Image (cartoon, rainbow, N blue to C red):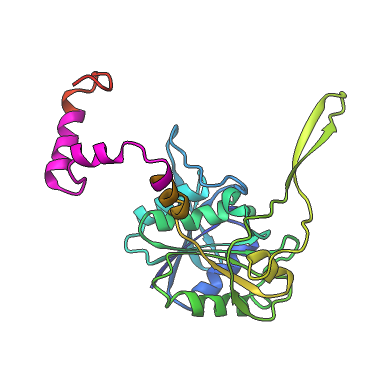
Amino acid sequence: MRILISNDDGIYSPGLACLAKAASEFGAVRVVAPDVERSSTGHAITSSRPLSYRPTTVHEFEAYRVNGTPADCVALGAHLWERVDVVLSGVNLGLNLGHAIWHSGTLAAAKQAALLGLRGIAISAPAGVEPDHGSYGRWIRRVLEVLLPASQLSLVNVNLPRSPKGLVWTRASVTQYDGRIAPAQDPMGRPIYWFTVSPLDEAEKGTDRWAVEQGWVSLTPLRLDLTDELRLDERRKVQPLDEAVAAAVSPPVSSPEAKATVREDEAESPAVAPGHD
Ligand code: MN
C-alpha cells in the first residue's frame, strides 16, 4: 500500500512525524507537506504562481516540502508518486470538529485526495498535546487498522481526545458553531478584530464533538456531495422551474453526441452572447 502523508501544520510538525511513523507499519510512506504552517487555509489551491518542492526527510522517510497549500501538496504528491492508495493528513495540533470541516487545511488535504479519486483520512488531536509515537501511536495504529481495509470509505475525519478510551463512529456536529469576532484595539487605538473560538454548550449525542468530550476517538465518514436531497425533492415538487423544457431540449449529457456538441459549441462560438445561436 502506498501512503501519502500531508498536513497543514507544516512539514516539521511533530504530529506529521508521529503519523508517518505509525503509517509505515501499513505500507510505503512518502511525505509531501507545506513548507510553512497553513492552518485554517481550508481547501485553497495556488493558481496564480508556480508550485515547487525541496526534498527533505521526516524521520527516515522520503519527504518534500512544498511552497503551497495542503490541497496543493496532495495534488502534487499524487502527480509525482503514481498509484497512491490513500492520503493521511495530520496529526493536526488542534481538533477539527463540526464546522472546522469548512476551515481546516488538515481536512482539505484529505478532501483533495477524495476529489482526485483517492481515499483521504484526516487525523486531529487537541491543541497543546504533542502527539508522540508512544502515547498516540497506539491509537493511530488502531484507527488505521479500522479504516485502511474499509475501502468503501473515501473520506473520514478522525479526532482524538486527550486520553482516549476507545473508538466510535460519529456524525459531524454542524448545528453548533464556535466562531466569534472579538473586537480589540491596536497600540494606536485603532479597532482590530480577532476571529476566535469560544467554548460551546454540551454537544449532541452521537456527534464528533460529543465523542471527543466523552473521551472517545471520533471517526466521521464524510462525503463530497453537499446537495440537500430532501430540499431538492421538495423544491422540484412545490416550486418546479423549467425542468420539463430542459429535459425535452437537452440530450443526455453522458452520450457521445452531447459531449461532441458541447465541444463544438465551445470551439465555434466563444464570442457569442448567451441566448444568441
Ligand atoms: Mn493545523
What's the residue at 77%, 56% (across, down)? Answer: 200
Q: Residue 209 in magenta?
A: no
Left or right of 223, for residue 250:
left
What's the residue at 56%, 80% (across, down)? Answer: 142
Where, quadrant-wise, is the N terminus in this rendering? bottom left
The answer to whether residue 90 is seen in the rendering is: yes
Outermost residue, left side: 257
Outermost residue, front side: 238
Q: Quadrant of ligand 1?
A: bottom right
Quarter residue 13 falls in: bottom right
Q: Residue 252 in magenta?
A: yes
The answer to whether residue 9 is seen in the rendering is: no
What's the residue at 15%, 36% (across, down)? Answer: 261
Instruction: In this rendered view, identify the residue nearer to me: 16 or 201.
Output: 201
Which x, y percent locates residue 236?
38, 46
Q: Is residue 119 above or below residue 275?
A: below
**SS majority, magenta:** helix
Instruction: In this rendered view, identify the residue nearer to me: 166 or 189.
Output: 166
Magenta region, residue range: 237-266
Quarter residue 11 falls in: bottom right
Where, quadrant-wise, is the C terminus in this rendering? top left
Which x, y percent locates residue 127?
73, 60
Which x, y percent locates residue 183?
82, 34
